[in-house]
Amino acid sequence: MTKTFTYDDVVRYLYAETSENENDLIVEALALNEDLMNFYMDSLEIQSQMDGIVRTPSDVTISEVFKYSQQFSPKQPAALSC
């Protein structure tokens, strides 16, 4: 019986969340199914782009965090508010 793989399976493969046996089967499915391969290639590119995203807080935000943290003594834990 041939297993049909979904896009979810390909994403799991992309993030190394599949077993070695599944890896072999997914690689075979990618070689045989052009749509699945195109999805994999697109997902690989998106993953690479997302890995390159760097978020940096503004100087104002950093200043506010430091100002807030200076309200507390080093021996007294800060109370968390929700």
Image (cartoon, grey):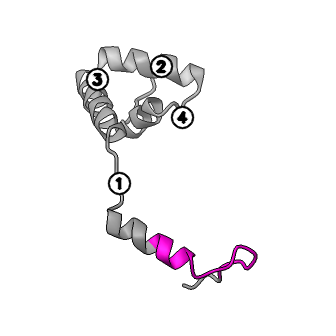
* 76 inside magenta stretch: yes
Location of residue 48 by image quarter: top left
Question: Quick check: 70 above or below 44?
Answer: below
**The residue tagged with tag 1: helix, strand or loop?**
loop
How many numbered discs sit on the rendered protein?
Answer: 4
Q: Nearer the viewer, mark 2 or mark 4?
A: 4
Say which residue label 1 marks: 56
Is 20 placed left or right of 25 in the picture? Answer: right
Query: What residue is rendered at 65% in x and 79% in y?
Result: 78
Q: Nearer the viewer, residue 36 or 75?
A: 75
How far is mark 1 from mark 2, CA to CA?
41 Å
**The residue tagged with tag 4: helix, strand or loop?**
loop
Say which residue label 4 marks: 17
Query: What residue is rendered at 47% in x and 34% in y?
Result: 15
Say which residue label 2 marks: 25
How far is mark 1 from mark 3, CA to CA?
35 Å
Pointer 2 and pointer 3: residues touching (CB < 8 Å)? no
Q: Where is residue 38 drawn, in percent x and y?
A: 23, 26
Magenta part of the protein: which range? 65-78
Q: Where is residue 65 drawn, in percent x and y?
A: 47, 71
